[in-house]
């Protein structure tokens, strides 16, 4: 395990800061780019390796401060899963490591995946709802890379991508939103079903093909074609703003009248279990952290803060725990370490 590399990440995008951070944990804006010629899915090992080496050289020329360069084939399974859990690599990139790579800035706010579906996936990650700022950051980086790389582009189609949904702008903007209030009132399903009319989709905690855990949903634009980058960002801003308002309304409803004592009971039961459990399975832990995060976001006086809960939301994931232990743990030992970590951080926090 490359533990010394992994532990230096700061995860600035998961800080409890930024606009609307009580509901919107983080923002991600990603650009898909390809070099001229066959896309990665049609390249052989030698071509992929050449592209990876060329990508590392090009990114170094752009001067990302203190960036870490990882060849996926040099990392073991735990390291690769850690990057997925940290939202720095996709499950696909981790599953097919040969001649693929990830480049990460020292605070994790800028990420490049190399040779996934596309030759380049450039992404900016920021805490809270910061779609415009994240887009500006990744757009500046894209401009610098364009000075040293020849990206595939056509005047009639825009940027050429492996998946038709990314064709045009190549832009995928998303917000990771925490919706326990709408989940508890039973309104989240209807709300998410309505996203299609706005050209948006909802995914799980780690994006496409992943499940919803801890009441976190990743909301993003469905396609990058037929609209400008500004139009895509404006549509997502509007929808995330409306969903944030609905979530806050649900939280207010749950904290009034007869519902209040039930919500207080759920939050304090979650806190009590997190502070006393000796074994904590991952999904159970995430659900209790979700309830605690809800209480804190509503301004309740509890022995923790949002920064600690955000940190635990990441650090209690399986690969994070294996890296902490410096070995692959059994499910029982992982559940025991997770419980001990939560108890210690809640007590210290």
Image (cartoon, rainbow, N blue to C red):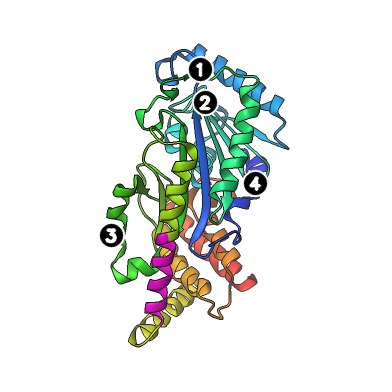
- Verify CB contact (< 8 Å) between mark 2 and mark 3: no
Which is in the foreground here, disc 1 or disc 3? Answer: 3
Q: Circle 1 sits in a helix, a strand or a loop, which is it?
A: helix
Q: CA distance from mark 1 to mark 3?
A: 41 Å
Q: What's the magenta bit mostly, secondary-structure-wise?
A: helix
Image position of 44 with respect to 168: above or below: above
Of callouts 2 and 4, the N-terminal one:
4
Of callouts 3 and 4, the N-terminal one:
4
| First to last magenta residue range | 242-255
**Residue denoted by label 3:** 189
Horizontal and vertical percent position of residue 272: 47, 77
Instruction: Please say whether residue 247 is one of the residues in the magenta stretch.
Output: yes
Q: CA distance from mark 1 to mark 4?
A: 27 Å
Image position of 148 with respect to 65: above or below: above
Report the residue at 41% width, 20% height from top.
Answer: 156
Q: Nearer the viewer, residue 302 or 177?
A: 177
Q: Circle 3 sits in a helix, a strand or a loop, which is it?
A: helix
Which is in the foreground here, disc 3 or disc 4? Answer: 3
Give residue 100's mark.
2
Give residue 9's mark.
4
Quadrant location of residue 273? bottom left
- Verify CB contact (< 8 Å) between mark 2 and mark 1: yes
**Residue denoted by label 1:** 48
Of callouts 1 and 3, the N-terminal one:
1
Report the residue at 39% width, 61% height from top.
Answer: 215
């Amino acid at each position: 395990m490359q533990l010394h590399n992994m532990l230096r990440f700061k995860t600035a995008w998961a800080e409890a800061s930024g606009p609307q951070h009580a509901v919107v944990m983080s923002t991600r804006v990603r650009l898909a780019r390809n070099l001229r010629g066959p896309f990665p899915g049609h390249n052989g090992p030698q071509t992929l390796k050449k592209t990876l080496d060329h990508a590392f050289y090009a990114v170094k020329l752009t001067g990302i401060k203190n960036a870490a360069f990882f060849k996926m084939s040099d990392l073991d399974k735990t390291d690769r899963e850690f990057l997925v859990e940290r939202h720095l690599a996709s499950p696909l990139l981790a599953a097919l490591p040969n001649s693929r790579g990830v480049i990460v800035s020292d605070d994790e706010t800028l990420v490049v995946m190399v040779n996934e579906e596309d030759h380049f996936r450039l992404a900016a990650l920021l805490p809270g709802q910061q779609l415009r700022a994240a887009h500006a950051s990744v757009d500046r980086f894209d401009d610098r890379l364009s000075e040293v790389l020849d990206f595939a582009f056509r005047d009639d189609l825009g940027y050429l991508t492996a998946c038709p949904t990314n064709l045009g702008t190549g832009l995928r903007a998303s917000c990771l939103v925490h919706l326990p209030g709408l989940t508890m009132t039973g309104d989240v399903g209807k709300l998410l079903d309505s996203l299609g009319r706005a050209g948006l989709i909802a995914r799980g905690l780690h994006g496409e093909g992943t499940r919803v855990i801890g009441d976190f949903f990743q909301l993003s634009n469905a396609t990058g074609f037929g609209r400008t980058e500004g139009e895509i960002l404006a549509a997502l801003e509007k929808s995330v703003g409306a969903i944030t308002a609905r979530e806050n309304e649900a939280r207010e409803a749950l904290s009034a009248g007869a519902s209040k004592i039930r919500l207080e009971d759920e939050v304090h039961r979650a806190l009590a279990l997190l502070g006393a459990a000796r074994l904590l399975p991952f999904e159970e832990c995430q659900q209790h952290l979700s309830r605690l995060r809800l209480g804190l976001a509503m301004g309740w006086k509890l022995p923790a803060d949002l920064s600690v809960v955000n940190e635990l939301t990441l650090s209690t994931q399986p690969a994070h725990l294996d890296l902490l232990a410096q070995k692959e743990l059994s499910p029982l030992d992982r559940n025991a370490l997770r419980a001990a970590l939560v108890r210690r951080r809640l007590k210290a926090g």
